């Protein structure tokens, strides 16, 4: 079986598994205990925080470990809205955020907040003119993803950060898909809060981070003990956090650029093979723009997502028909809907292929061959039916 669904999750790196099993076997202590076992666990926690802070170019004290990006997003959005509701009731986000941003926004609307969902064009990109028109004195929070998990489009984070420097609104960025792939410096970009998750970069599931600038204040989302300097209660997941540290440390900045180029090359091999075979397709997004190159979303006119995905699965290829979180439901992708409208045939005939650090060119070529064979078979069947 060949795995091409790395935007959903990634296999754990052997170094990560080793770090985690070492922790589980030897250093099982509670990081809050004052005895030897606790102190050892605390050192592991400090080391992981340092590794991640180094990768993000921030101080270790600004990193809060969470149970994943869903928790980080919920915390950043719900808690800043609560803390700042006296200063304004307006929030800006985009129509193509992950559900762990969109659903907190919907909950806030029920509480009386007013949320602007910036639209996207056919490339899955927002416009700064729309952003400028939405921003006002009532805006207390702007939450915009770095790059999209379904189509790979990248948002103008630097430009928005510049516009918010002299504005009261906090700037939160969901960098879950971008963190392992793009070098991000929150301070230089004017980002106040940032979410990321370990399992998207060959780390374990159920561990994430929330970076927050020292000037950003809000009550903890999870109340209880004084862990994470009172910012997130609950006994720390030491094996998971240590694995997250190892996962982040194994990708250096130079490697990120190389990964982006490698994935762009993979995408070209697939589109090139489709061109050569004369199979009609559209890219959902724009391969010529700055983007997260590990995500490739393709529309094959006349071929249903469901048929394509099941046939590819039978042939041994794991890809996604949309995002993993919504793939199980019959709801069409909210991202493709925002890009092409609810009536677009692309909603029912698109697939997402996503590469990871263990994807090889041979796998990509085998996939392209299988995709062409299956697409041609399904198209012939449609003509004969
Ligand atoms: N944000 C984005 C953009 C994602 O792709 C995901 C992945 O599912 C999440 C948030 C949620 O992350 P987690 O699975 O760590 O809760």
Image (cartoon, grey):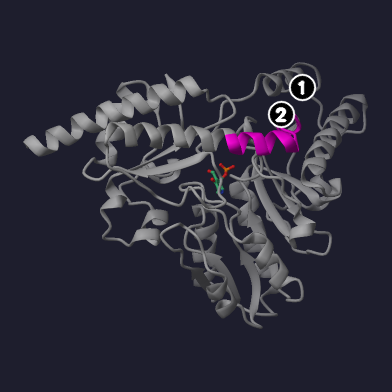
Residues at marks 1 and 2 touching, judged by CB atoms closer than 8 Å: yes
- Measuring from the top left, give residue 239's x and y in whole percent: 73, 28
256 relative position to 350: left or right: right
Mark 1 and mark 2 lie on one chain; the one further toward the N terminus is 1
Q: Which mark is drawn over residue 23?
A: 1
Q: What residue did someone put label 2 on?
A: 243
**Which residue is the extreme one toward the left?**
385
The image shows residue 63 at horizontal and vertical percentages of 78, 48
Q: Up-down: is 69 above or below 355?
A: below
As displayed, is residue 95 above or below residue 23? below
Judged from the image, the secondary structure of the residue bearing numbered disc 2 is helix
Residue 246 on the magenta segment: yes
- On whether ligand 1 comes within 8 Å of the CB at mark 1, the answer is no
- Residue 98, placed above or below residue 277: below
Along the viewing direction, whichever of 301 and 249 lies nearer the viewer: 301
Instruction: Look at 14% across and 33% down and name the residue there.
Output: 380
Q: Magenta segment, principal secondary structure?
A: helix
- Can residue 236 be seen in the rendering of this structure? no
| Residue count near mark 2 (Cα–Cα under 10 Å), binned few <14, some 14–19, many ≥20 | many
Q: How far apart are marks 1 and 2 (CA)?
A: 9 Å
**Image quadrant where residue 385 sits:** top left
Q: Which span is picked out in magenta?
A: 243-261
Residue occupying the far right of the picture:
35
Q: Does the residue labelled 2 lie within 8 Å of ligand 1?
A: no
Q: Residue at x 25, y 33 (%)?
A: 375
Q: In which quarter of the image is ligand 1?
A: top right
Residue 78: x %, y % from top left? 62, 62
């Amino acid at each position: 079986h060949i795995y091409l669904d790395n935007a959903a999750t990634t296999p754990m790196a052997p170094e990560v598994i080793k770090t985690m099993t070492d922790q589980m076997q030897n250093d099982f202590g509670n990081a809050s205990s004052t005895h030897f076992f606790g102190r050892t666990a605390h050192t592991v926690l400090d080391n992981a925080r340092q590794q991640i802070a180094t990768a993000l170019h921030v101080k270790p004290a600004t990193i809060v470990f969470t149970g994943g990006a869903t928790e980080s997003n919920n915390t950043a959005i719900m808690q800043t809205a609560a803390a700042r509701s006296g200063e304004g009731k307006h929030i800006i986000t985009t129509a193509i955020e992950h559900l762990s941003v969109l659903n907190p926004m919907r909950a806030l609307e029920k509480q009386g907040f007013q949320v602007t969902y910036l639209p996207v064009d056919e490339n899955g990109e927002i416009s700064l003119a729309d952003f400028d028109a939405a921003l006002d004195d009532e805006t207390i929070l702007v939450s915009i993803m770095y790059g999209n998990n379904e189509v790979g489009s990248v948002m103008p984070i630097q430009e928005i950060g510049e516009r918010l420097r002299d504005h009261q609104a906090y700037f939160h960025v969901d960098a879950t898909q971008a963190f392992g792939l793009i070098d991000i410096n929150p301070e230089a970009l004017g980002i106040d809060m940032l979410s990321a998750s370990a399992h998207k970069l060959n780390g374990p599931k159920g561990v994430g981070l929330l970076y927050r600038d020292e000037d950003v204040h809000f009550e903890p989302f999870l109340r209880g003990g004084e862990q994470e300097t009172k910012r997130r209660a609950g006994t720390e997941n030491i094996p998971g956090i240590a694995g997250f540290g190892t996962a982040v440390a194994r990708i250096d900045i130079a490697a990120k650029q190389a990964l982006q180029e490698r994935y762009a090359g993979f995408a070209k091999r697939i589109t090139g093979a489709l061109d050569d075979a004369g199979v009609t397709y559209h890219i959902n997004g724009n391969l010529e723009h700055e983007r997260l190159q590990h995500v490739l979303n393709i529309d094959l006119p006349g071929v249903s997502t469901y048929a394509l995905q099941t046939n590819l699965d039978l042939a041994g290829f794991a890809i996604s028909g949309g995002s993993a979180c919504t793939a199980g439901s019959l709801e069409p992708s909210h991202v493709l809907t925002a890009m092409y409208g609810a009536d677009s045939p692309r909603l029912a005939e698109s697939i997402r292929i996503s590469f990871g650090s263990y994807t090889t060119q041979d796998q990509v070529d085998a996939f392209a061959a299988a995709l062409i064979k299956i697409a041609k078979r399904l198209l012939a069947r449609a003509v004969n039916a």
